[in-house]
Amino acid sequence: MASAPTRTRKWLPYAASVSAGLVVIAGAVVLGQREATPTGQDRPECTVALEVNSSTEKAALLIELAEGYNDSRRSLPGGGCARVHVSRLNSGEATDALAIGWRGTNLPEPHVWLPTSSLWTGQLRLLDRAAGREPQTPDDYPSIANSPLVIAMPQQKGELVRQQGPLGWGEILGLSGREGWAGFGKPEWGRFTFGKDNPNLSTSGLAATIATYYAAAQRSSDLTRADLADPAVTQFVRRIEANVSHYSDDSVELLRDLAEADLARDGKGSGHMSAMVLQEELVYLYNEGRLSPRRDGQEQGARPRVPLVAVHPKEGTFNLDHPFVVLPSADEQQRAAAADLLAYLTEDAQQERFARLGFRDHERRASAALLASVGAEPPGGLTYFSPPEPEVVKAMLDGWSILRKKANVLIALDTSGSMKAAVGDRTRFQVASTAAGKGLALLNSEDRVGLWSFSSETRRRPDRPYQEEVPLGDFDQKRLTSRIANLHVDGGTALYTTVRAAHQHLVDRYDPERINAVVVLTDGKNEYSPDNDLAKLLADIELNPQRPVKVFCIAFDRDSDFATLDKIAKASSGKAFDATDPTKIDDAFVKLVSSF
């Protein structure tokens, strides 16, 4: 891999120290909800105020548990009691904030931090060291809950794989890819592909990448930078990444879409995707209908017709350990309160609440309900990989940016007259083109990228409503950016015919070694009378498992027909991103590009 081009990696959301090697786009994306939720009532007699910041996936539960803690008025060892307040923030963004003195969050500075994984405490330690200050997270920390990483597969496929006996990461996600399901006696199922979260955005995606490297190195601890440079390791990782259908910025949203498709298509919603790598807790929530569409008044949706089965690779897996971290900002009384809160959270009654969300308990024990839902553990239980050193994680992600699956991306940019509308002191097109330029900067230098413009027939483009501006080919960021800046804005919005043509263009140029995707940026809805049949468009672009081309849409500004764009994206197993608030367009591009 020495000859491979090297690019600066934009690692979102860790916007912190360049010297630590975590090069980022500061403030580019907010993945968690920046909100502080009050817990309980003010109690003057409880004079110790304890601020807790939780990762987003368990924050709602922690807010409820804090209310119970406050209501209990538990006595502290030195007398008095504590009042706990919980706010929520994505683990990566919280790492950022702690590294720069908790600025810019609009949330109270925490005394206790509850990230998804100790991987984040290691990254914060790395940042503190690079900044020349005492580490805020120097220790190992107790867990309040756990969730191992699994390979989740639709039931029939998962049971078939389980019947083969113990299989490893490579045998499940890599070696089977070349001949597909024929290697398991099911050629009619086609190619083996799987989805995973982008490790630059997701804890489970990061954990999946670490697990892959451990499996490649054939060890469960003490992974080194030398291991990462081993040609056999890089070949193993590349082989697995080659079977990725697409990367996701959010596995919860991916599962919500899968649940919706399952219920809408008589249980055929898994489409061409054979597996997903994610935490066990999400498999449970999916199977129980917690991620299914809900009707008014329902606490949860219907259980999917085709549940997921958790498959455990024989080499072992990575555990998301949800550590309880007491920060240096806590004084002596707050540390006593934190110790009491930890004791409270690990009591049976509170652990049962975690179990209802699909978590294992603080000692990694699974409930009977969890195993009944996701599938039994292997005989002898699970084997866990030890977390690598933070420097190794950073090097691993640097390597992943080169080894990950590359993409064929055709960008279709709306140049209709409505893009002249004002957004502050600029036009919609100026805002959109600036965001597109930033998005291009996130692509891999080995991606292949093309650019189309579309509106309706105009004086400058009398023959058809779309035009090839840059042919699909080797990524040339400078050329693409220059061409976007010089596009002419005029005409109506020929959305359907452009999507259909762009999709077919990529089907005809399909590359099985790449992710093949159409990206549509528009501020409107279809205004082209020669082609206004949405049902026909959805049928035309429906995902072909043999040549999967996905459509990703960004709905820009308030006039966009997001509902229709969402249908278009889902028909192809792609995704629509809502930037109807123009200030969110940069975020939308970041999440979109992270899918490649």
Image (tube, grey):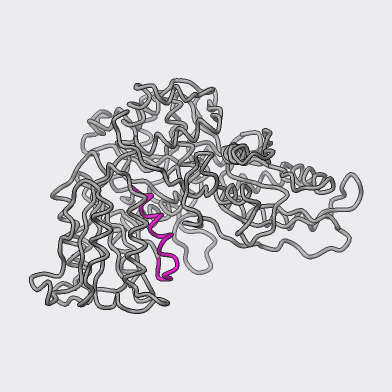
* Residue positioned 75% across, 62% down in the render: 40
Q: Is residue 203 magenta?
A: no
Dominant secondary structure (helix, strand or loop) of the stretch shown in magenta? helix
Query: For residue 579, which quarter of the picture?
Result: bottom left
Above or below residue 595? Residue 401 is above
Tell me, yes or no, if residue 367 can be seen here.
no
Image coordinates of residue 381 in percent, x first then y, are 54, 26
For image coordinates 50% across by 50% down, the residue present is: 13
Q: In this rendering, would 319 be left or right of 444?
A: right
Say whether residue 341 is left or right of residue 89. Answer: right
The verdict on residue 586 being magenta is: yes
**The N terminus: image quadrant:** top left
Residue in front for this viewpoint, 574 or 543: 574
Residue under the point 31% across and 61% down = 553
Indicate the position of residue 486 as horizontal and vertical percent values.
23, 66
| Residue at figure coordinates x 41%, y 61% from the top left | 586
Is residue 147 positioned above or below 82 on the image?
above
Highlighted magenta segment, given as a residue range:
579-596
**Residue 282 in the figure: left or right of residue 247:** right
